[in-house]
Image: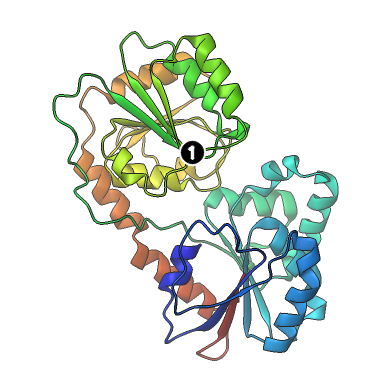
Amino acid sequence: MSIIINNLDTTKFDFKLVLINGKNRFYPISSSITILDLNASRLLTAIPTLINIIREEAPDIVFSTLTHLNLFLGMSKVLLPKQTKLIARESSIISINNKYYKYPTLTNKLIKKYYKKFSLIICQSKFMLDDLVDNYDVPTSIMTVINNPINPPKSNLHSKEQNKSKPKFITVGRLYKEKGYDRILKALALLKFDFEYWILGDGSFKDQLTQLIDELGLSDKVIFTGLVKNPFDYLKQSDVFLQGSHFEGFPNAILEATYCGLPVVAYDAPGGTQEILIEGFNGFLVKEDDYQEFANKIEQSLNGSFDSEKITAHTIDKFSLDKIIRAYEDAIMSTQDHPIPEVQIN
């Protein structure tokens, strides 16, 4: 979301960024943007302060992101200024993601009731929108789909190492169970040739993955890099991007990989992956848990049939930053009866 915030047209919008807790900010925010950091340990304790700020500022729009924050703002709408419109950016498949919440049944009931309070809900993928319609009865009239943009550093995308001794595979993402790294590793163990597999990320599932790597005899092939701020240097030296996720809202890592011209082999899981990949053009989708077919598609991806430059061009054409920013600005303006709203982004 920081990419969107940093690139909105300040001649159209006067906005402030309110952070529940900005202590561990990973992405930079432009110095021209006013930031209000609540320094709260939990969202629940920040809600009263957040509501007071909105009432004092009386903005035309409050733009929020993340499901739990969206829900609390929807529930608080009656306490906000009447002219303030609520826009939510949804970044998850709620019916699946809520299974990981402490009280999923209650959360689902509240979302079904209060998500209808928003003037607009921006979904990252068509799958997300359909999920809200089918499982929460949110009307399509208050929703739209805007994909995430690609905004990489300028570099020579296709300057791969010459005369590599073995292919390199890569995955970028948090080391959580739902990311399905175990499914990738089980497929890799079926390959009959030497390779390197780079995992860029960190998380609570690392110990289990390390144990599985040992059990599968892959210890000399798998490399953990930890959290990497700029994955592009690794991506452009790789041959195939691998995704094992059980579900994905809209996978930025796949956009980054295809921008670098990499083909992608992914399990056909719920979410936005299937809205990015074109079978045989920029990757393959494999039936859930079919490890042998996943391994087969990895081998097929190495046979030289993919055109890296065409994959890059397609990604830029469909997911360019300028195109996505215009879509956000048009969506925000569509909720207003006058031209220059003040936007509070949380």
Whether residue 222 sits left or right of residue 74 in the image: it is left
* Disc 1 residue type (three-letter): Gly
Residue 40, placed above or below residue 104 = below
Q: Position of residue 12 (x, y in %)?
A: 45, 85
Give the x, y percent position of residue 126.
Answer: 53, 52
Q: In the rendered view, would you say 144 is above or below 285?
A: below
* Residue that appears at 22% across and 52% down: 155
The relative height of residue 246 versus residue 290 in the rendered view (above or below) is below
Residue at the bottom extreme, as displayed:
338
Residue depicted at 78% across the width and 64% down the height: 114
Residue holding disc 1: 201
Q: Residue at x 44, y 80 (%)?
A: 32
Q: Is residue 288 visible?
A: no
Label 1 secondary element: loop
Q: How is the image coloured?
A: rainbow
Left/right placement of residue 209 relative to residue 47 reads left
Percent position of residue 262, x then y: 30, 37
Number of other residues with Cα within 10 Å of mark 1, as a class: few under 14, some 14 to 19, many 20 or more: some
Number of numbered tags placed on the structure image:
1
Residue farthest to the left?
162
Quadrant (top left, top right, bottom left, bottom right) of the C terminus: bottom right
